[in-house]
Image: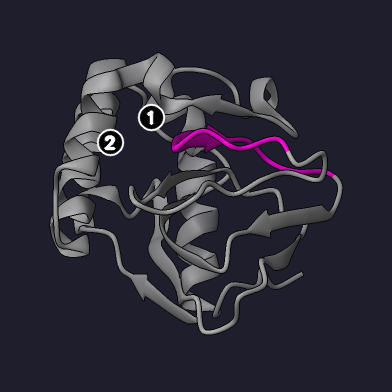
Amino acid sequence: MHVQQFAPPDYLKEYVRYFWLLESAGDKAEPKTFRMIADGYPGLIFQQPDYPLFQDHMHTQWPRAFVYGQTTTSGNIYAPSSFKTLGVYFHPSALTAVFGFDADELTNSCLDLNLLTAPLCEQLVNTEPIGKQIELLSSFLFALIQKNKAVVSQDIQYSLRLMRSTGGELPC
C-alpha cells in the first residue's frame, strides 16, 4: 500500500489542508479494512475508474466521487484488494466557503459529487496522471469559492495560521 500527500496551491491553503493519494496494487487477494476516525475534518474522495468501489459498514458501495462531512463516530471502511483513491482533506470551515452549505448538513454522511457536478467527475475519469487530476480539482474548488464569494472569518484564518506555525496544535 502506498500513501502520498500533496500540498495545495497557495490560493487554496485557507481551505484545503492537503490532497492525498492512497493506492494498493493488490499484493494480497483479500479486501482491506480501514478504521475511520472521528476527526472533524470534511473531505472529498474520488475513486479512480477501473477499480471496485469502497463500501461502508453495511457493505453499501460508495459513489465514485463524493464530498463528506465531519464524522462524529468511528467505523470501518472496506476496500477491494486493488484500488487507487484521490482525496482532498479540507479545513473544518471549508465546506461553507467551497460548496455553500454548512458542514453540519453532511455530518456523518456524504453527497455524491455527480449530484453537484457530473462534468467534473467525467473530467477526472478522463484525466491522467494524478498531478493533472489535482490541478483539475484545484481549479474546480477555486471556481466554487469565487462563485460563492465566501470569506473564511478572520478568527478562523488566525487559528489556521497559528496551527501551521505550531505544528498543528493550538497553545492553551
Callout 2 amino acid: Leu
Q: Is residue 11 left or right of residue 118?
A: left
**Which residues lie in the magenta part?**
60-72
Which sits earlier in the primary sequence, circle 2 or circle 1? 1
Q: Which residue is mark 2?
A: 141
Q: Is residue 25 left or right of residue 32?
A: left
Say the numbered circle drawn on residue 98: 1
Q: Is residue 11 above or below residue 139?
A: below
Residue 11 place in picture, x, y as percent: 21, 49
Q: Is residue 35 above or below residue 46?
A: below
One can see residue 149 in this view: no
Q: Is residue 20 above or below residue 53?
A: below
Colour mode?
A: one colour
- Which residue occupies 27% across, 25% down? 144
Residue 98 place in picture, x, y as percent: 38, 29
One can see residue 121 in this view: yes
